[in-house]
Image: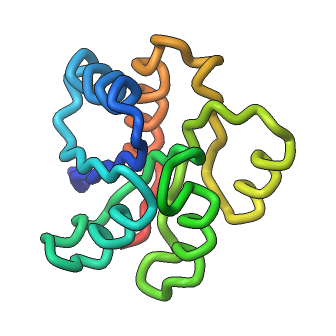
Amino acid sequence: MAETVTVLVVDDDDVDVEGVQRAFRKAKIANPIRIARDGVDALRQLRGEGVEPVARPYIIILDLNMPRMDGREFLAELREDPEHRDAIVFVLTTSETPEDRAASYDKNVAGYIVKSAVGEGFLNVINLLDRYWRVVLLPA
C-alpha cells in the first residue's frame, strides 16, 4: 500500500490555495494539505519550528511571487538544507519568464506549471500530482 503523501502548498493567494483544496476534494484525494503563506512560513513548517513538522513523504506546490521570502529565495534555501534538499517541488506560478523557469529547473524542481495555462483547471494539476506520487518513490 502506498504511503500517504503530505502536500505543502506555499502560496499567498487565497483564491489559488482554495482552488487547489477544491480540486483535491473534487478528485476525492484525502491527502493531508498544509498551507504556508510564504517561504519563511514554509521553512518553519518543514523544520518544525513552533509547529509539528510536515510529515514525510511530502510534495511542495510552490508559487514564486510572495512577500517576505518568495519562491526563488525559498528554493535556494531549501536546496541548501541537508534535511530537505531532496524535497519534490512543483512550481505553480503566474510567471511565464524563461529566466524564472530556467532558475527553477536549475534548483531541481519536478515541474513548472503556469497558472494562466491551468486557469480554473486545478483538477488537472492535482490529478497529475496524484498519479506522480502513486508511481514515483519519494524521499523518505
Q: Nearer the viewer, residue 71 or 58?
A: 71
Q: Is residue 122 left or right of residue 17?
A: right
Q: Nearer the viewer, residue 58 or 51?
A: 51
Q: Nearer the viewer, residue 63 or 33?
A: 63
Residue 8 place in picture, x, y as percent: 33, 52
Image quadrant where one finds the C terminus: bottom left
Residue 30 place in picture, x, y as percent: 17, 35
Can you tell which quarter of the image residue 20 is in?
top left
Question: Across the whole image, how many numbered discs are drawn on residues?
Answer: 0
- Check the image and name the residue furthest to the bottom: 82
Q: How is the image coloured?
A: rainbow
Q: Is residue 122 above or below residue 131?
A: above
Q: Is residue 33 above or below residue 116?
A: below
Residue at (66, 41) in percent of width and height: 112
Residue at (35, 50) in percent of width and height: 37
Residue at (64, 29) in percent of width and height: 114
Q: Is residue 15 left or right of residue 26?
A: right
Residue 66 place in picture, x, y as percent: 51, 48
Residue at (40, 18) in percent of width and height: 123
Can you tell which quarter of the image residue 76 is in?
bottom right
Q: Nearer the viewer, residue 31 or 39?
A: 39
- Check the image and name the residue furthest to the top: 120
- Check the image and name the residue furthest to the front: 68
Residue 107 place in picture, x, y as percent: 69, 65
Q: Is residue 71 above or below residue 129?
A: below
